[in-house]
Image (spheres, rainbow, N blue to C red):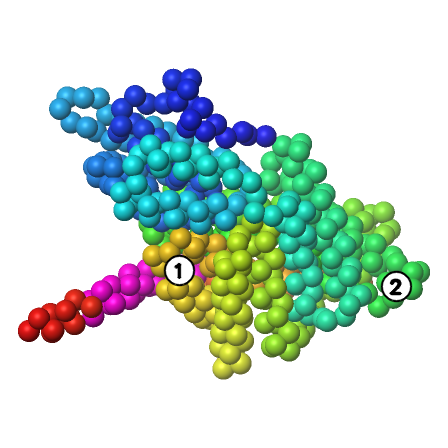
Amino acid sequence: MFRHVSMSELGLTGQLPSTTEGLAVELTLRIGDLLFGSGMSTQDTILTMRRILTAYGLARAQVDITHTSIIASYYPGGGLPPITSVRIVKTVVANLSKVETVGRLVEEIVRGKPLGDAMRALDAIRATPLPYPVWVAILGESLISVSIQLMYTTSPRMLLIALVTGVLLNLFMRAMMRFALPPFFLQLSGAWLAVGFAAFASWANGRIEFFDGVDPTLVALGCLWQLVAGMKFVAAVQDAIDTNYVTATARLLQVVMLTGGIVAGLVSGLIVLNRFGLEVYISATPLTQGALPVQVIGATALAAVYLVGNYANGRTIVLASAMAALARVGYAMTLTSGFGPIASNFVGAFAAALLATLLVRKTAIPGFAIVAAAMIPLVPGSRLYYAMIQMVGTVNIAADMSLGINTLGVALGIGLAIAAGASVGVFFGRPIGDRLMTLPRTWYDRMRTYHKE
């Protein structure tokens, strides 16, 4: 596993730049690496890095991000050679509590924190232990299946099955990561296990009393949601709107490959089981979700447990849960007003992203994480699942390629609507939030002028 080498260690071995400008560039690259690797958009990462460089007198420095690397270059003038550094972005588990602490450090740098103190502060942040034990994060990720089930049923038996299968899937995926498999094959193997759970539920129905009446479709659906790449898709579309087309294309291709792994695992798993004569009774008809209050509870829980799995702190989790509830209510109200699912998802995503951006603007709270977590309950994972089932067929339902392609098209349209709604909400929330932050100061200045007169 990759071990972070602190700036202090590099300084002791003579591997740090010898100039103040070089040290500022090195510090900026490390902060940018942490933020971008945690899921922050390209534009926001670049803006943050430029704020740091400007604070240390390097306003003419240039920053570029190409998805796998971050480049910063500064030309000091006077015939001196330019200072250019490149840092490869490492794939790490997001630690959102660390991201918030880094956000506070950036604000201190802008207010004049000395370079040496900032370097030591970053080393301390990097060395900070996780905010809670790893098993809590594993449980949080596993509870995604339970949260999905809450949107369809409140049966304690189904929720218990979802918890067990979620934990087993999570542990299995972590074990597979040790073999350094490409993400496509990790997703494929996870989908195989989800199909295996559904097959066991089908076999046990009528043989084991506890599983009598258990819906294999819900069992598989809850597991597959743990594999959906919701945050990456939102970040990709946001990069495209911000005209960062290189990173947008790379992130979109990454989402395609991750989703392709799920599809390949689902389809191949069903085919193999059918060839061996194992009956998997999976419905190709979308299940009916529960009442709106139950949906809101499920969406709120889904956003919360997702952030627990990414080591977020309490206030980030609470705020994201509230935004997820808002997104779900906005979606439901728009849908009942006669609009289709694509427009309804756009409205729900836009409302949550706009309000979240306004609330966290000019704070250290990682807004990108709140927006992404709020969008996850809207991600059309179930439609993608049903599209694959309809195209492949089951043991009791014939394949219908045209119906499956139609369902897949709607799922892709919903995915784009969610990402676009979130991105547009963030896009408008930034300038509005900046303006709102200046209003108290403007009122204060006017009052002072009034009293002087």
Camera-nearest residue between 351 and 118: 118
Classify mark 1: helix, strand or loop: helix
Q: Amino acid at mark 1?
A: Val
Camera-nearest residue between 362 and 249: 362
Q: Amino acid at mark 2?
A: Phe
Vertical order, 427 against 35 (above or below): below
Q: Is residue 224 visible?
A: no
Left or right: 55, with 274 as reference point: left
Q: CA distance from mark 1 to mark 2?
A: 46 Å
Q: Is residue 446 visible?
A: yes
Q: Residues within 10 Å of mark 2 (few under 14, many from 20)?
A: few
| Residue for badge 1 | 360
Camera-nearest residue between 69 and 22: 22
Quarter of the image where the C terminus is located = bottom left
Q: Position of residue 235 (x, y in %)?
A: 45, 51
Residue 210 numbered mark, or none? 2
- Secondary structure, magenta segment, majority class: helix
Q: Residue furthest front?
A: 452
Q: Name the image quarter holding residue 77.
A: top left
Vertical order, 91 against 255 (above or below): above
Residue at (23% x, 36% y) in the render: 58
Q: Position of residue 253 (x, y in %)?
A: 49, 44
